[in-house]
Amino acid sequence: MTWESAISFFLAVLVFGITPGPGVFAILARALTSGAGSCFYLALGMVVSDILYLIAACIGLAALATHWSEVFTVVRIVGAVYLVYLGWKMWNAPLDLSATEEKPATFGGALSFLQGALISASNPKVILFYIAFLPTFMDLSVMTATDIGLAAFLTLVALMIGLMCIALFAAKARKLFKSERAVKRLNKSAGSIMVAAGAFLVSRN
């Protein structure tokens, strides 16, 4: 991978990372209710799953999405149900004006990481995206372990930047909610986003 292709790859992955989907919806919902800091491990879990798909694509495991389609279907459904459950909890969350103030995250890092990993792992089409995506930036027939490592590193940085920028933007929007009515609207909006993410996830073939 040349420097020119590496920069192009980085920018393309950055754009891919902020494209609306279940992961972005989950980041938005979490940041709206708990601030940007609570999104770090959630985003990291998503990115690690994406990198695993990237590596699988690099070493030619396209058959994974086809031969293990039943397993991916189960994972997708489990992930969707979990998102809907989180959305329901947010929708029915008690009114708390202090929720609009920045405070330490109440979500455990490990749980958030696993949630993020589940969200990304439930979409096996990501591997197909990378399979179609990678030949634009590198010659897969002569790709080395160093190339794979560089692509994984660039993906990690680009996706984390994209997702955390979304989280910071959403967290800033929280400051606009100062009344009970506004907080109620915030909870319902965040819950609706999470439920929509779950519905979006389970509807994918």
Image (cartoon, grey):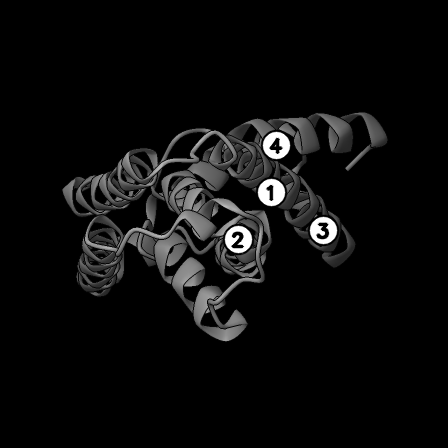
Q: If the image is split into quadrants, where does the N terminus sit?
A: top right
State the separation of the CA atoms marked 3 and 1: 16 Å
Residue 14, numbered label: 4
Q: Earlier in the sequence, mark 3 or mark 1?
A: 3
Question: Which mark is nearer the camera, 4 or 1?
Answer: 1
Is 39 positioned to the left or the right of 11 in the image? left
Element assignment for label 4 = helix
> Where's the C terminus, which quadrant?
top left
**What residue is shown at x 50% (from left), y 74% (from top)?**
110
Between the C-alphas of marks 4 and 1, the distance is 11 Å
| Cα separation between marks 3 and 4 | 12 Å
Q: Identify the amino acid type marked 2.
A: Cys
**Neighbourhood count class around disc 3 (C-alpha, 10 Å): few under 14, some 14–19, many 20 upward:** few
Q: CA distance from mark 2 to mark 1?
A: 7 Å
Query: To which residue does mark 1 refer?
Result: 164
- The residue under the point 43% across, 42% down is 32
Find residue 104 and report its horizontal and vertical position in percent. Answer: 58, 62
> From the viewer's perspective, is the residue at label 3 or at label 4 nearer?
4
Label 2 secondary element = helix
Amino acid at circle 3: Phe
What is the distance, in whole Å, between disc 2 and disc 3 at their CAs? 20 Å
Nearer-N-terminus badge (2/1): 2
Q: CA distance from mark 2 to mark 4?
A: 17 Å
Q: Nearer the viewer, residue 56 or 196?
A: 196
N-terminal label among 2 and 3: 2
Badge 4 amino acid = Leu
Q: Position of residue 177 (x, y in %)?
A: 42, 34
Residue found at x 24% / y 61%: 82
Q: Residue furthest right?
A: 3
The residue at which mark 3 appears reads as: 153
The residue carrying mark 2 is: 39
